[in-house]
Image (cartoon, rainbow, N blue to C red):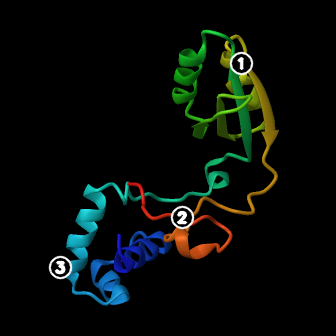
Amino acid sequence: MDSIDRRIIAALASNARISLKELSATVGLASPSVAERLKRLQEQRQIAGFTVAINPRSLGYAFQAIVRLNPVPGALDAVEKLIVGTPEVIECDRVTGEDCFIARLCLPSIEALDVILRPFHKRAHTVTSIVKSQPVLRRLPPLNPDETNPRLPRTNHHTR
């Protein structure tokens, strides 16, 4: 990935609906060249997809919660299936440490939390925190990690 690819990604991150013509002007290349780069970035999974960001409150979700889940012995797969099958779980990470999963849920009410978590209680220990605010919304990591923070160790390679 070169500096032009990084500029393309940065432009798309700020406006995924930017036209090819505008994107081309932004990065200083002809439209066919930008289209070819976009295709390559997608084929190499450097761009994994395009999405829309919504305000959960506008859909009636007044609360969000972070739930840490630690499955009981033998229930890891069952808990993962429950997580995947629960539409109120909007993202989930499988993690190391004391817990196995950390999930973010959207809730229409505090009372809904008990209903949503009830199926998990026989299969996992849960610890829930209600989200008060989100000082950092989901964002791109630095597009060139070697140049962003002088305290970070330098790498000689980039993984794909």
Point 73% across, 47% down: residue:
62
Looking at the image, which residue sits at the far left? 32
Point 74% across, 28% down: residue:
98
- Check if mark 3's residue and mark 2's residue have beta carbons within 8 Å: no
User: Foreground: 131 or 60?
Assistant: 131
Quarter occupied by the N terminus:
bottom left
Label 1 environment density (alpha carbons within 10 Å; few <14, some 14–19, many ≥20): few
Badge 1 element = helix
Residue 126: which quarter of the image?
Answer: top right
User: Foreground: 61 or 70?
Assistant: 70
Residue 37: which quarter of the image?
Answer: bottom left
Q: What residue type is disc 3 on? A: Pro
Q: Which residue is mark 2?
A: 140
Point 71% across, 18% down: residue:
118
- Mark 3 and mark 1 lie on one chain; the one further toward the N terminus is 3
Q: What residue type is disc 2 on? A: Leu
User: Foreground: 76 or 97?
Assistant: 97
Give residue 76's position: percent from left, percent from top: 58, 18
Q: Which residue is mark 3?
A: 32
Label 2 environment density (alpha carbons within 10 Å; few <14, some 14–19, many ≥20): few
Badge 3 element = helix
Residue 104, disc: none
Badge 2 element = loop
- Mark 3 and mark 2 lie on one chain; the one further toward the N terminus is 3
Count the marks: 3
- Mark 2 and mark 1 lie on one chain; the one further toward the N terminus is 1
Q: Which residue is mark 1?
A: 118
Q: What residue type is disc 1 on? A: Arg
Give residue 46's position: percent from left, percent from top: 36, 59
Label 3 environment density (alpha carbons within 10 Å; few <14, some 14–19, many ≥20): few
**Gap in angstroms between the C-alphas marked 3 and 2:** 26 Å
Give residue 81's position: percent from left, percent from top: 52, 22
